[in-house]
Amino acid sequence: RKHDPYKEYGITRAEYRRMLDEQNRRCKLCKRKETCVHYGEIRRLSIDHCHKTKVIRGLLCNNCNRSLAGVEYFRSLKLLKQALAYLRSFEGKES
C-alpha cells in the first residue's frame, strides 16, 4: 500500500497546493526551490509538522526537513542555542 502523506497529516491535496502557492513553491525555511531528485523526479516539498502536537508548520525542501529532524533531538530551545553558540565559536577556525 502506497504511503499517502496528505492523509497522514490530515490535509487534502488542494490544501497542500494552496500552501505551495502561498510559499511561492519554495521552502518555508530557506526560501529555495526543491532540488533533491528521487527516482528521476524533483521531490515534492515535505509537510513539516510538530511531532508532539501534529500541527503543520509549512512545506520544506528535503535538505531543511532533514536538518530540522536532527534539531528535534535537542530537548529544549536552550540546548539548541547552546549548540549554535558552540558551532559559532569555531567559525573561521576550520583548516
Image: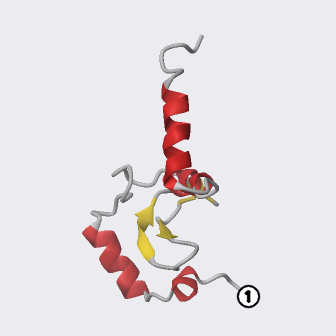
Using a 10 Å C-alpha cutoff, classify the residue at mark 1 as few (fewer than 14 neighbours), some (14 to 19) or many (20 or more): few
Q: Describe residue 33's horizontal placement relative to residue 68 as left or right.
A: left
Residue 39 placement: quadrant? bottom right
For the C terminus, the quadrant is top right
Image quarter (top left, top right, bottom left or bottom right) of the N terminus: bottom right
Percent across and percent down for residue 65 are 53, 58
The x, y position of residue 64, in whole percent, is: 49, 52
Residue 94 shown left or right of residue 27 in the figure: right
At x 42%, y 66%, the residue is 59
Residue at 56% from the left image edge and 47% from the top image edge: 79
User: With 27 as the anchor, is 44 left or right in this view?
Assistant: right
The residue at 58%/54% (across/down) is 66
Which of the colour schemes (rainbow, by chain, secondary structure, one colour) is used?
Answer: secondary structure
x and y, in percent, of residue 50 in the image: 51, 71
As shown in the figure, which amino acid type bears the numbered disc 1?
Arg
> Relative to 85, is 63 above or below?
below
Q: Nearer the viewer, residue 76 or 72?
A: 76
Instruction: From the top left corner, tell me how far across and down residue 49 is, in percent.
Output: 50, 72
Residue position marked by numbered label 1 in the rendering: 1
Residue at image x 52%, y 79%? 53
Task: Tell how many labels.
Answer: 1
Secondary structure under the numbered disc 1 in the rendered image: loop
- The residue positioned farthest toward the top in the image shown: 95
